[in-house]
Every structure is written in structure tokens, then in C-alpha cells.
Image: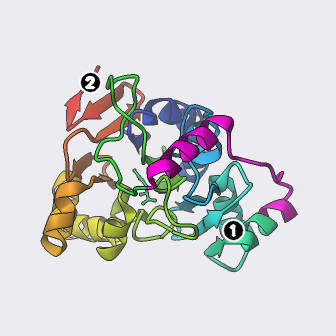
């Protein structure tokens, strides 16, 4: 670590997302603007069924999106279970910038987005609808452990993958963003960790930032991202802090922990980063002025 600016994000789709965020960082822009721009790439990707507009629906056929953003001043904004709006991260940003609140949910979030000039549109794509109808035949809710990207993992299947992104700008300020369509075929109204400040994302500009991906219920139970940041405050490295947060999940629910994936990604004030996950196969992308990397289980993929 050490070199600034830097942007890191979860999963293979973090690579193109980081590239977009980098444009803002390289131009001397703010980390908060970089992370918003970066995560919009997977949000708008029609092939991505786990984040944004092409996300898989819940079990009743509704696409409901969750996102949050947090800046270097401790400002934060979030939307949860929002329908009919393609870029939840931008609505989360507007909640942060334009309202006295931190979190808007459901219809209220969509209504606010429309008032801010964002277009209401149908999100369920023909492909997502087909996947949902196929799921309905058995209607079994059992999240897959991995999950990743056919591109690099032949045979891999998308089920749940959230983009969590953390950036430090040239001034040394830290911000983060997290956005997801949540667990595919979840119950209608279910909200995961991703839009919850402290669970799916946390930033403290004195210490660092953390974000999570995987089965959100276990992250919420342990206030995962806040825990990782607090452990770094006490002197742990980003990787050790992520590892300890994973250990808490195992300790609290050992049987559940065997069957699911949860991954944490963290960065400290110095720009050192690390990750740890319950199961193997967790990847994250790193972008600085001198490198563009994808790490899978901590090893460089390229
Ligand atoms: C959730 N954490 O809604 C999200 C889903 C997901 O990779 O990540 N996962 O629980």
C-alpha cells in the first residue's frame, strides 16, 4: 500500500468500476465523486444481475435496489428497497446532499428520486424475468456460495454480488459506496447489509473504510464494516481486521457460516488494503497510478 490516490472494490466487476472512478481521482477530484461514478458502471451493466437495473427480482417479481454512500466528513446517504430507479447510488448521494435524513426506503425513495429529476422506469429485464420464472418452479431460497463471474470462472453463477468501493483521493480523504440488487429471490421488502451504514459500508476519515459482500443478514448481525474500521483504529492491518470480522460471524453462527459466503474489504488511512472471506473465491480489484490488479483469495490474478 501507500500510494495515493487509490481505489479498491469488490469482485471482478470492480476492475471496470475502478477504471471509471480513477478518472475522477486522477483529475484531483474528491473520493466521494469517484466512488459514485465508479459503482454506476455495474449498476448500468445489462449483464449484471446482482447490482442495479438488470438485477434479479425478489420472489414476487419486483426488482428492489439498495445502496449507500459515505464521505470523509461522516456525511452519509442511503436508499433501501427502492423500485423503478436505475441508479440507486445517485439517489443515496442526493439523500446525503439534499435532505436532512440518512435513509429513504421503498416508495418514498423512488418519489424523492423523481422529484430530483430522475426518470422512473421498469427495471425487470426479459432475462431477469425468465430467471425468476425458472426459480419459481422450485422456489427454493438457498444462496450460492460463489457466485462469481463467468468471465474468469467458467461455470460460475451469478446469484449475489454487491459492489462495495473504497477510495482515497489525492488529498488523502476517504469515501465509500455500496450498491446491490440484494439476494436474488429474497422476500419482498427484505433489506440486506448493503444500504446500512456500519454494516455494508463504513468510512472514518481518521482510520479507513470497509465494505462487505455476501449474505447480508450475517453482516448486519455483527455490524461488520463498522467493526472492521474500529479494529483498524486499534491497530490491526486491513486484512487482520477483515479476518477478525469473519471470525465473529463464524463464532456467532457456526453452522450458517459453513453454507454461505461473506467477504470484507478494507483500506486504512495509509492506503494499505486487505480482504478476507468466509469461503474461497472472493475477489477484489485495486487501482492506483501504477497498477490495475484483480486479487482472488489475496493472490494476483493477472
Ligand atoms: C445483501 N450483501 O443484500 C448483499 C448481497 C450480496 O454479494 O452481496 N452480495 O445481502
Q: Residue at x 53, y 62 (%)?
A: 71
Asked whether residue 119 is drawn in magenta, I would say yes
Image mark count: 2
Q: Quadrant for the N terminus, please.
A: top left
- Location of residue 206 in the rendering, given as x and y in whole percent from the top left corner: 37, 66
Q: Quadrant for the C terminus, please.
A: top left
Helix, strand or loop for disc 1? helix
Q: Which residues are magenta?
A: 113-139
Q: Residue at x 61, y 75 (%)?
A: 102
Quadrant in the rendering for residue 125: top right
Quadrant in the rendering for residue 237: bottom left
Q: Crowding at label 2, few (<14), some or many (≥20) Cα neighbours within 10 Å?
A: few
- Location of residue 75 in the rendering, given as x and y in whole percent from the top left corner: 57, 70
Residue placed under numbered mark 1 in the picture: 95
Residue 278 circle label: none
State whether residue 46 appears in this view.
yes
Sequence-wise, the earlier of marks 1 and 2 is: 1
Residue 301 circle label: 2
Q: Is residue 30 above or below residue 66?
A: above
300 relative to 116 in the view: left or right: left
Amino acid at each position: 500500500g501507500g500510494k495515493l490516490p487509490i481505489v479498491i472494490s469488490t469482485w471482478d466487476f470492480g476492475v471496470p468500476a475502478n477504471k471509471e472512478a480513477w478518472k475522477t481521482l486522477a483529475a484531483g477530484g474528491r473520493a466521494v465523486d469517484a466512488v459514485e461514478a465508479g459503482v454506476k458502471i455495474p449498476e448500468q451493466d445489462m449483464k449484471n444481475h446482482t447490482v442495479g437495473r438488470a438485477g434479479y427480482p425478489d420472489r414476487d417479481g419486483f426488482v428492489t435496489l439498495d445502496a449507500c454512500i459515505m464521505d470523509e466528513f461522516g456525511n452519509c446517504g442511503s436508499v433501501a428497497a427502492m423500485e423503478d430507479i436505475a441508479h440507486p447510488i445517485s439517489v443515496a448521494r442526493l439523500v446525503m446532499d439534499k435532505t436532512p435524513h440518512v435513509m429513504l426506503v421503498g416508495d418514498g425513495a423512488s418519489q424523492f428520486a423523481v422529484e430530483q429529476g430522475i426518470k422512473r422506469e421498469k427495471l425487470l429485464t426479459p432475462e431477469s424475468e425468465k430467471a425468476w420464472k425458472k426459480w419459481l418452479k422450485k422456489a427454493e431460497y438457498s444462496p450460492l456460495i460463489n457466485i462469481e463471474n463467468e468471465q474468469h470462472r467458467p461455470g460460475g453463477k451469478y446469484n449475489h454480488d454487491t459492489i462495495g468501493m473504497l477510495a482515497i483521493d489525492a488529498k488523502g480523504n476517504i469515501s465509500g459506496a455500496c450498491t446491490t440488487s440484494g439476494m436474488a429471490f429474497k422476500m419482498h421488502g427484505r433489506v440486506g447489509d448493503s444500504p446500512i451504514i456500519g454494516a455494508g459500508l463504513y468510512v472514518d476519515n481518521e482510520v479507513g473504510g470497509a465494505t462487505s459482500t455476501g449474505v447480508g443478514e450475517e453482516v448486519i448481525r455483527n455490524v461488520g464494516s463498522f467493526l472492521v474500521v474500529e479494529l483498524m483504529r486499534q491497530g490491526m492491518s486491513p486484512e487482520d481486521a477483515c479476518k477478525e470480522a469473519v471470525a465473529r460471524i463464524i463464532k456467532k453462527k457456526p453452522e450458517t457460516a459453513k453454507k454461505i459466503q461473506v467477504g470484507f474489504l478494507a483500506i486504512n488511512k495509509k492506503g494499505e488494503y486487505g480482504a478476507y472471506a468466509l469461503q474461497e473465491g472472493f475477489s477484489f480489484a485495486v487501482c492506483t497510478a501504477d497498477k490495475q490488479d484483480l486479487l482472488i483469495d489475496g493472490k494476483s490474478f493477472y
